[in-house]
Image (spheres, rainbow, N blue to C red):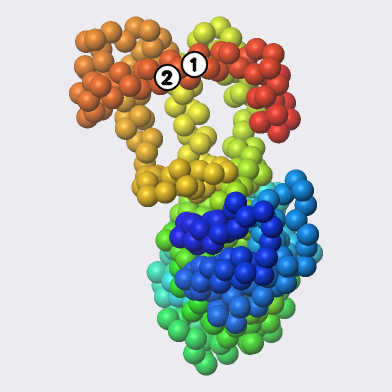
């Protein structure tokens, strides 16, 4: 996410590093490179120009504090302006209705149906809501099927009526079902088109007028860049929607849509999609995204994801096993599963400050754990519980069973042993306190 933009902004801001003071000449040179980086990221020219003009004005209007280098001050100014450009404040979702009605809109292929499921899962797991999904795409039977599959994945009921070709009537019937059966949120998935057309806009407008939703969300594929911004404007002119959802931010996106869409439509980005899994949804925080764009990471979001997957009871069991030197490969496998649930690895690594430069050019596969899991699954239950029993012949059998090399089995054994020793050390006073801090005060004792 934003790898190319981050690299170019870093080079642009590097111009001021080493300078003793901010001058009109070196600021002009820096802002010129910043503008070029934004344009390369597919940010609208007018927005990029206004952005750099504000940065220049603020930079020249300040005296450099003795504790700050000019480059550090410029980074802060750019970060603050990026945050404002992307909305400034984190925007919540309106769930005041009874039931709360959320209308999803967007073009075909934007990920609208999948994200309807992600949003339902988010509201169910994070907000303790009881959502109902409603299938209002009467043109593609596959869209109805897809929503039902998504609903089964997250254990959320889906209302559809394959005999009815009127999306307005289907939406109204879905809301009536929600009221009578105790659902407190209704998420309505509407039809998309390959392009904005009059018939499509009339249909979504009619649905909107008939159901009066608390939230109308526009789902956009962030990989389409400036086209996404233009499409958002066309939809907003008709619907006056409440917020934007950016999907596929885990892909090879230049980031122009995320940076400039708020400025064009004056509507906040509320959620982002960061992967294919149903859990791959994040509330959009402009300040955190600005940090990530500038290569500062996003430790807060990383900790929040870890907390979401944190199992206090499981942690206590593992701590007891570590204390008794009984931490085995089954426990190790359990830890791997928790990490995998946090999201795709490249996205997670991007949340660690400075990791972007270190990982530049590396292809971090989401299946990076696959060979480790294969090796562990090739062990017997006794071997997983008692790793010390793995002699040469057992390692050869495990390697053959997992389709890996004996060298990889030995390497895993070495890494496992090192990790176990480190965890044992962290059971002590200082390490234990550090674990408590990292756990965010989640009850590790």
Write the residue at 50% across / 10% down: 326
Say which element carries label 1: helix
- Which picture quadrant has residue 377? top left
> Which of the labelled discs sits on residue 327, or is there none?
none
Whether residue 154 sits left or right of residue 267 in the image: it is: left
Q: Position of residue 219 (x, y in %)?
A: 56, 70
- Which picture quadrant has residue 132? bottom right
Q: Mark 1 points at which residue?
A: 420
Write the residue at 55% across / 18% down: 423
Q: Dot 2: within a 10 Å radius of its alpha carbon, few (fewer than 14), some, or many (20 or more) residues?
A: some
Above/below status of 410 relative to 177:
above
Label 1 to label 2: alpha-carbon separation: 6 Å
Write the residue at 48% across / 39% down: 340
Whether residue 198 sits left or right of residue 94 in the image: it is: left
Above/below status of 443 relative to 70:
above
Whether residue 272 sits left or right of residue 243 in the image: it is: left
Q: Where is residue 279 in the image (x, y as percent from the top left)?
A: 54, 49
Q: In which quarter of the image is the C terminus?
A: top right
Compare residues 139 and 229 and report the one nearer the observer: 229
Above/below status of 384 relative to 363:
above
Instruction: Report whether residue 171 is seen.
Output: no
Tell me whether circle 1 and circle 2 mark residues in contact (CB < 8 Å): yes
Say which element carries label 2: helix
- Which picture quadrant has residue 309? top right
Q: Position of residue 247 (x, y in %)?
A: 52, 64
Instruction: Report whether residue 13 is seen.
Output: yes
Q: Name the residue under label 2.
A: 416
Above/below status of 439 relative to 274:
above
Write the residue at 73% across / 30% down: 441
Compare residues 158 and 306 and report the one nearer the observer: 306
Q: Position of residue 414 (x, y in %)?
A: 37, 17
């Amino acid at each position: 996410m934003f790898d190319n933009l981050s690299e170019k902004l870093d080079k642009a801001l590097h111009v001021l590093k080493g300078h003793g003071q901010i001058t009109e000449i070196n600021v002009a040179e820096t802002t010129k490179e910043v503008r070029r980086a934004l344009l390369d990221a597919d940010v609208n020219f007018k927005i990029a120009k206004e952005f750099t003009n504000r940065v220049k004005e603020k930079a020249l209007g300040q005296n450099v504090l003795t504790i700050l280098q000019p480059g550090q001050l410029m980074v802060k100014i750019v970060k603050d302006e990026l945050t404002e450009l992307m909305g400034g404040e984190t925007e919540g979702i309106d769930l005041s209705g009874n039931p709360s009605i959320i209308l999803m809109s967007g073009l075909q292929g934007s990920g609208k149906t999948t994200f309807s499921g992600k949003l339902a899962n988010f509201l169910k797991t994070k907000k303790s809501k009881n959502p109902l999904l409603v299938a209002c795409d009467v043109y593609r039977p596959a869209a109805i099927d897809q929503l039902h599959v998504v609903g089964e994945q997250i254990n959320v009921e889906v209302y559809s009526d394959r005999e009815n070709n009127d999306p307005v009537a289907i939406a109204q019937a879905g809301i009536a079902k929600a009221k009578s059966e105790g659902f407190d949120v209704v998420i309505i998935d509407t039809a998309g088109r390959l392009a904005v057309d009059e018939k499509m806009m009339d249909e979504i407008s009619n649905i909107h007028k008939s159901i009066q939703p608390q939230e109308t969300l526009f789902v956009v594929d962030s990989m389409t860049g400036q086209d996404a911004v233009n499409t958002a404007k066309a939809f907003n002119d008709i619907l006056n929607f409440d917020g934007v959802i950016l999907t596929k931010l885990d892909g090879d996106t230049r980031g122009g849509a995320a940076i400039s869409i708020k400025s064009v439509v004056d509507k906040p980005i509320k959620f982002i999609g960061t992967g294919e899994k149903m859990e791959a949804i994040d509330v959009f925080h402009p300040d955190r995204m600005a940090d990530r764009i500038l290569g500062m990471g996003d430790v807060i979001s990383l900790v929040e994801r870890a907390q979401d997957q944190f199992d206090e009871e499981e942690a206590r069991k593992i701590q007891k096993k570590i204390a008794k030197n009984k931490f085995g490969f089954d426990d190790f496998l359990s830890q791997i599963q928790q990490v995998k649930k946090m999201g795709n690895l490249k996205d997670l690594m991007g949340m660690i400050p400075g990791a972007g430069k270190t990982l530049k050019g590396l292809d971090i596969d989401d299946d990076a754990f696959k060979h480790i899991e294969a090796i562990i699954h090739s062990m017997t239950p006794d071997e997983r519980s008692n790793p010390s029993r793995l002699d040469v012949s057992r390692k050869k059998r495990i390697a053959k069973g997992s389709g890996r090399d004996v060298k990889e089995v030995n390497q895993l054994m070495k890494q496992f042993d090192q990790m176990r020793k480190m965890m044992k050390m962290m059971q002590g006073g200082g390490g234990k306190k550090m674990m408590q801090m990292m756990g965010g005060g989640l009850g590790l004792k």
